[in-house]
Image (cartoon, rainbow, N blue to C red):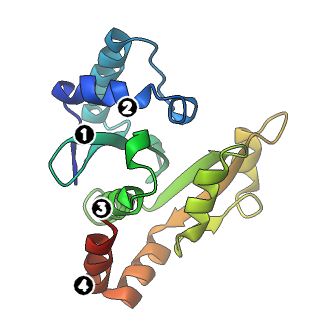
Amino acid sequence: MLKKRELQDSQALYELMTHPDVFPFVRQKAHSYEEFLFLSKQTIEAEDRGELISRTILDEWGQPIGTINLYDIEDKAGFLGTWLGKPYHGKGYNKIAKDAFFEELFYTLGIETVFMRIRTVNIRSQKAAEKLPYVIQANETRKDLFARLNPTEKIYNLYEIPKDLYTLHVLRNGHEQQEESHLLEA
């Protein structure tokens, strides 16, 4: 479902990223394939330096369908950035990718907190985040961070996924149930 970023996936990812329903919400915007290739190379190098964590999301046949990333890593916390190609919206891939990514972040890579900044105009992503039982709306509880994201006007809502709340969710639901629901969604 997830693999480390590789340049060989760039063409497929670029074509998916440029769709008008996807492009406005992508953090690393590229206006040409060459620019996307350059940004992908920078992303791979930044991961090697420990600045971010980036994975390619794959479908059941191993084809690239989007990316999931943890940016701005500091003090065992970072910001989630994820996008899927338009043909894969609403098919359960987002949840499956997030669960796999959180497992790796929290239990392999030592991350303690994942933040999500979601544009107030991105209703689809806000609704998706609010469906997750381990997500906390953090505009009030992380006021300093919220203010840094919105220095002049409210552009973003802030969400937080603490490792302990995610772990509690996994323990309550069990890995077996979680895997079963993943198969149903795929």
**Sequence-earlier tag: 1 or 4:** 1
Asked if labels 3 and 2 touch by Cβ distance under 8 angstroms, the answer is: no
For marks 2 and 3 on the same chain, the one whose residue lies earlier in the sequence = 2
Image quarter where the N terminus lies is bottom left
Question: Marks 4/3: CA distance?
Answer: 14 Å
Element type at marker 4? helix
Q: Secondary structure at mark 2?
A: helix
Badge 3 amino acid? Ala
| Amino acid carrying mark 4 in the image | Glu
Label 4, label 2: how far apart the Cα atoms are? 32 Å
What residue do we see at 75% from left, 39% from top? 155
Which residue in the rendered view is the most extreme toward the right?
A: 152
Q: Residue at x 29, y 32 (%)?
A: 49
Residue pictured at 32% horizontal, 38% vertical: 50
Question: Pointer 2: what residue?
Answer: 16
Please give the name of the residue rendered at 84% of the width and 33% of the height, measured from the top-left corner: 152
Disc 1 + disc 2, Cβ < 8 Å: yes
Which residue lies under the disc numbered 3?
100
Which residue in the rendered view is the most extreme toward the bottom? 172
Q: Earlier in the sequence, mark 4 or mark 3?
A: 3
Mark 3 residue element: helix
Question: Nearest the camera: 38 or 150?
Answer: 38
* The quadrant where residue 109 appears: bottom left
The amino acid type of the residue labelled 2 equals Leu
Q: Is residue 160 left or right of residue 1?
A: right
Closer to the N terminus: mark 3 or mark 1? 1
What is the spatial separation of the Cα atoms under label 2 and label 3, in whole angstroms? 21 Å
Q: At which x and y percent is residue 118?
A: 63, 47
- Cα–Cα span, label 3 and label 1: 15 Å
Depth check, mark 3 against mark 1: the one in front is: 1
Q: Which mark is residue 176?
A: 4
| Numbered label attached to residue 14 | none
